[in-house]
């Protein structure tokens, strides 16, 4: 009698995380004739909402899309008028109102549509859905074994952590963990804004709104479907969110939901009513999002057979608008490095990380600085000064 034995599947390249960065890497590898397996914890591509609008930068995200051979398809997704920017103070006084002509420098697209574009450009079966990674361990000579939540394992010659803020792969190269930035966001939506919320539609305008005051701000964007996506930015203690039942806002209301909404609005006491309405009149749930970041300048020593990209490598606050752009550029640059060094993975990883570290440090520093200037005592003056300086340089 013989006993059957099973062996773990083996993937020469395993990418953990099917976000924009991981998918860009998989696509650039595919363009260069290199196969990769992507593992993602979601059960399906549409398992959860993908967030709002992204401005895709010419010097980063668009470079990645060109490397992926998808720049023309990306251009078809651009939200006309989405580059418009309005900056207001807490009294709703307009300090800057720029039109939204598409310059090509930072056009706006919906994150979900961009992700769908990348997914559609990969061979069927590239992404393994419902594959939640719980850990990984080195096997020697650059190989790793990865364990999934269902107990299954696989091995790989190159392991890429593209699995976000709380990466399960990061501990293989670094003991750094994200820390609370002192700011939390509360996310909301106003549906069919022109008809149902005309006052809010008018104050936001056709693109992006920044309404800023000391320790609080409202950031909003008009979506292609006519809705408004709103974030309340609050300088609060890390445990502030846990004091309110935000889950009740998703469940349909009641005292808990009313208390959570009132707690957010309390942070905007004395603000103009047209701005408070962005939260007071929001449809459906309010979603709290504490903002964490890795240390500025996060880097690691070269570890054979493993590297990181995107938030796993350089998590930062959203105040520079660089997170998605850098993740895509990371993916493209890593893919090109691997294609340029066939048979020498370590040389490819060393070249990739040598460029990654200073690039991500500069963006993380800008993000940390912008968080401070957007919510300082004289807000919105800091952001206005930055816009003026950028225009002067341009």
Image: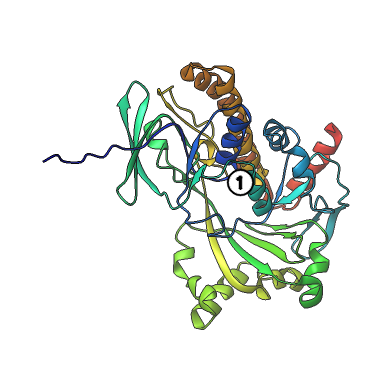
Q: Residue at x 49, y 71 (%)?
A: 247
Check the picture and name the quadrant holding the N terminus. Answer: top left
Q: Residue furthest left?
A: 1
Residue 168 placed where, x, y %? Answer: 40, 42
In this view, the residue in front, 274 or 215, is: 274
Check the picture and name the quadrant holding the C terminus. Answer: top right
In this view, the residue in front, 32 or 286, is: 32
Residue 164 appears anywhere in the view: no
Q: Residue at x 64, y 33 (%)?
A: 329
Q: Is residue 106 left or right of residue 230?
A: right
Residue 252 placed where, x, y %? Answer: 54, 79
**Tag 1 residue:** 119
> Could you classify mark 1 by the number of other residues whose Cα lies within 10 Å: few (under 14), some (14-19), or many (20 or more)?
many
Residue 25 placed where, x, y %? Answer: 58, 34
Residue 369 placed where, x, y %? Answer: 64, 40
User: Which quadrant of the figure has residue 60?
Assistant: top right
Question: Which secondary structure lies at badge 1?
Answer: helix
In this view, the residue in front, 48 or 186, is: 48
User: Which quadrant of the figure has residue 207?
Assistant: bottom right
Q: Residue at x 81, y 66 (%)?
A: 203
């Amino acid at each position: 009698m013989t006993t059957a034995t099973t062996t773990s599947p083996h993937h020469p390249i395993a990418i953990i995380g099917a976000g924009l960065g991981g998918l860009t890497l998989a696509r650039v590898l595919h363009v260069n004739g290199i196969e990769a397996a992507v593992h993602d914890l979601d059960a399906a591509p549409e398992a959860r909402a993908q967030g709002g609008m992204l401005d895709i930068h010419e010097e980063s995200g668009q470079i990645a899309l060109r490397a992926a051979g998808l720049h023309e398809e990306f251009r078809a997704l651009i939200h006309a008028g989405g580059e418009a920017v309005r900056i207001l103070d807490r009294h709703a006084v307009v300090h800057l109102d720029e039109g939204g002509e598409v310059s090509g420098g930072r056009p706006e697209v919906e994150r979900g549509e961009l992700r769908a574009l990348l997914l559609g450009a990969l061979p069927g079966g590239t992404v393994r859905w419902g594959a939640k990674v719980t850990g990984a361990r080195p096997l020697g000579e650059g190989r790793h074994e990865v364990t999934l939540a269902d107990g299954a394992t696989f091995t790989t010659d190159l392991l890429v952590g593209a699995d976000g803020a709380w990466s399960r792969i990061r501990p293989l190269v670094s003991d750094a963990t994200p820390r609370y930035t002192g700011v939390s966001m509360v996310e909301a939506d106003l549906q069919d804004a022109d008809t149902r919320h005309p006052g809010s539609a008018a104050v936001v305008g056709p693109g992006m709104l920044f309404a800023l005051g000391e320790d609080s701000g409202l950031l909003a964007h008009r979506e292609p479907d006519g809705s408004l996506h709103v974030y309340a930015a609050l300088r609060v203690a890390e445990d502030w969110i846990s004091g309110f039942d935000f889950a009740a806002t998703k469940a349909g209301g009641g005292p808990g939901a009313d208390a959570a909404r009132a707690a957010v609005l309390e942070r905007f006491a004395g603000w103009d009513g047209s701005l408070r309405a962005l939260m007071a009149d929001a449809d459906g749930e309010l979603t709290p999002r504490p903002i964490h970041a890795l240390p500025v300048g996060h880097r690691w020593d070269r570890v054979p057979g493993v590297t990181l990209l995107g938030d796993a490598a350089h998590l930062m606050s959203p105040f520079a608008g660089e997170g998605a752009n850098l993740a895509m550029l990371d993916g493209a640059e890593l893919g090109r490095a691997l294609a340029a060094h066939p048979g020498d993975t370590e040389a490819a990883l060393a070249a990739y990380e040598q460029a990654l570290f200073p690039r991500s440090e500069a963006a993380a520093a800008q993000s940390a600085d912008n968080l401070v200037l957007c919510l300082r005592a004289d807000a919105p003056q800091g952001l206005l000064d930055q816009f003026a300086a950028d225009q002067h340089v341009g």
